[in-house]
Image (tube, rainbow, N blue to C red):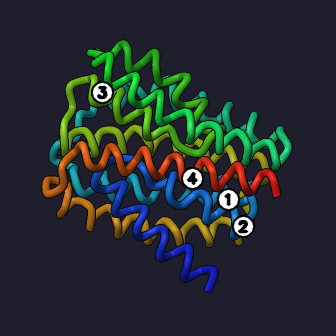
C-alpha cells in the first residue's frame, strides 16, 4: 500500500509539474517524509525529480534554450553538491522545519518576483545559478523560484518548461552523485526513487497535453495552495 500511495501521488505530482513546471516536489515531498522519514525522503525525491525533469526535457526537446540552461548550470551544479553536504550535517527534525518554512516563504517570494517583472540575460542566470543550486541541494526543490527566473529570461510555455527542466536535470544529477559519495544512497532508497520517478516521468507527458488548456492564473493559485499545504504538513511532521 505504501508503494501504491507513493506511485499514485508521484503520478499526480509529475502531471502538475508537466503543466506548470513546478509543484512536483511540493506535492510529493510530504508523502515521502511520512513514508520514509526526512533523511531518506530527500535522496528519493532527488531521483524522482531527475526522472520527472528528464520527461519534461524529452516532451519539449524541440524548444530548448540550451545556452540559457548552460549558463545556469555552470554555477548551480557545484553549489548543489555543497547544499547536499550541508543538508546531511544537520539534525533530521531541523530538516523538516527548514523545508516547511521554505515552502511557506516561497508563496511570498514567487509573488514578489512576478510583481517586479525581472528581465534577465544569460549572465544573470550564471550568477543566480549558485544560490539556486545550493538551495536545491538543501531544500529539495526551488521550482517556485527558478520558473519565474527562466520566465524573466524571456522563455514561455514549452521553451520555459523544457529549459528549466534541462537545468534541473544537471542539478539533480549532481545531488544524486553527492548523496552517493556521502553514503546516503543505499539500494533501497535508489529503488524507491526509481519507483516514484517513473510515475513522475509518465506524469510529465500527461501534463504536456493539458499545458495550453488551463489558465496560467489558476495554476499560480494552485501552486501557492500546494506550497502552503506542504509547508504546514512538514512543520506538523517536525513537531511530532
Q: Which residue is mark 2?
A: 36
Q: Which residue is mark 4?
A: 230
Q: Residues within 10 Å of mark 4 (few under 14, many from 20)?
A: many
**Residue 119 image position (x, y, % from top left):** 26, 15
Is 186 on the left-hand or right-hand side of 44? right
Q: Which residue is mark 3?
A: 68
Q: Residues within 10 Å of mark 1 (few under 14, many from 20)?
A: many
Q: Residues within 10 Å of mark 2 (few under 14, many from 20)?
A: some
Taking depth in this image into account, of 27 and 18 the one nearest to the observer is 27
- In this rendering, the label closer to the viewer, 4 or 1: 4
**Residue 186 image position (x, y, % from top left):** 74, 64
Instruction: Tell me, for residue 41, which label it has, or none.
Output: 1
Name the element at disc 3.
helix
Labels 2 and 3 touching (C-beta < 8 A): no
Instruction: Give the answer, above or below, for where 124 lies relative to 32.
Output: above
Residue at left 46%, top 20%?
128
Question: Which quarter of the figure has residue 40?
Answer: bottom right
Taking depth in this image into account, of 104 and 182 the one nearest to the observer is 104
Amino acid at each position: 500500500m505504501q508503494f501504491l500511495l507513493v506511485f499514485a501521488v508521484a503520478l499526480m505530482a509529475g502531471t502538475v509539474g508537466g503543466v506548470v513546471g513546478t509543484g512536483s516536489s511540493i506535492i510529493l515531498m510530504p508523502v515521502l517524509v511520512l513514508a520514509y522519514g526526512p533523511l531518506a525522503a530527500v535522496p528519493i525525491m532527488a531521483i524522482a525529480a531527475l526522472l520527472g525533469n528528464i520527461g519534461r526535457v524529452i516532451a519539449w526537446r524541440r524548444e530548448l534554450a540550451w545556452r540559457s540552461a548552460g549558463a545556469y548550470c555552470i554555477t548551480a551544479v557545484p553549489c548543489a553538491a555543497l547544499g547536499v553536504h550541508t543538508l546531511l550535517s544537520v539534525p533530521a527534525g531541523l530538516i523538516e522545519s527548514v523545508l516547511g518554512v521554505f515552502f511557506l516563504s516561497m508563496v511570498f517570494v514567487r509573488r514578489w518576483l512576478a510583481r517586479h517583472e525581472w528581465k534577465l540575460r544569460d549572465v544573470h542566470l550564471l550568477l543566480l545559478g549558485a544560490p539556486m543550486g545550493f538551495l536545491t541541494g538543501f531544500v529539495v526543490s526551488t521550482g517556485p523560484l527558478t520558473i519565474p527566473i527562466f520566465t524573466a529570461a524571456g522563455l514561455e510555455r514549452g521553451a520555459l518548461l523544457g529549459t528549466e527542466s534541462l537545468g534541473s536535470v544537471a542539478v539533480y544529477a549532481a545531488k544524486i552523485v553527492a548523496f552517493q559519495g556521502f553514503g546516503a544512497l543505499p539500494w533501497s532508497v535508489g529503488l524507491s526513487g526509481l519507483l516514484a520517478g517513473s510515475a513522475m516521468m509518465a506524469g510529465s507527458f500527461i501534463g504536456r497535453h493539458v499545458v495550453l488548456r488551463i489558465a496560467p492564473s489558476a495554476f499560480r493559485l494552485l501552486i501557492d495552495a500546494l506550497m502552503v499545504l506542504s509547508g504546514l504538513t512538514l512543520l506538523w511532521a517536525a513537531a511530532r
